[in-house]
Amino acid sequence: MCSEYEKSVEVNKMKMPECERDDCRFVHRSGMTTLAYYQPIYDKNGVNINPDMNTRTDYVDCLICGKKWIACTERNQTTYEELKNA
Ligand SMILES: [Zn+2]
């Protein structure tokens, strides 16, 4: 009964940093973004041909392990860099 809902959750879920426990909980804190506004422009197939090219930097903490990461998001791809001794 819930399968459609679960599928949509699967599609929309965020990529999270690698962390060691199964019960890790992550907190996202907003950081900086380059503030250019990209007006979406769509072709006939509904594909955005002017994607957001801003780079944003957020901070992610694991509440369980106390690890911290910097999350860099560019063109909807997020990469995580662990902050050691932070
Ligand atoms: Zn963790």
Image (cartoon, rainbow, N blue to C red):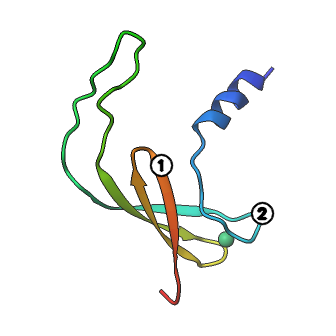
Q: Secondary structure at mark 2?
A: loop
- Residue indicated by mark 2: 22
Q: Position of residue 29 (x, y in %)?
A: 41, 63
Q: Is residue 71 above or below residue 2?
A: below
Residue beneath the point at 66% across and 65% down: 18
Task: Tell me, for residue 77, which label it has, or none.
Answer: 1
In the image, 49 versus 85, the foreground residue is 49
Dividing the picture into quarters, in which one does residue 21 lie?
bottom right
> Which callout, 2 or 1, points at the residue further toward the start of the chain?
2
Q: Dot 2, crowdedness within 10 Å: few (<14), some or many (≥20)?
A: few
Total tally of numbered discs in the picture: 2
State left or right for residue 51 relative to residue 13. Answer: left
Q: CA distance from mark 2 to mark 1?
A: 23 Å
State left or right for residue 19 relative to residue 61. Answer: right
Q: Is residue 13 above or below residue 61?
A: above
Residue beneath the point at 77% across and 24% down: 3
Q: Position of residue 72 (x, y in %)?
A: 42, 60
Residue beneath the point at 60% across and 71% down: 63
Q: Is residue 37 above or below residue 73?
A: above
**Residue farthest toward the top in the current orientation of the protein:** 44
For the N terminus, the quadrant is: top right
Q: Position of residue 65 (x, y in %)?
A: 66, 77
In the image, 28 versus 46, the foreground residue is 46
Q: Is residue 38 above or below residue 43?
A: below
Q: Amino acid at mark 1?
A: Gln
**Residue farthest toward the bottom in the current orientation of the protein:** 85
Q: Secondary structure at mark 1?
A: strand
Q: Amino acid at mark 2?
A: Asp
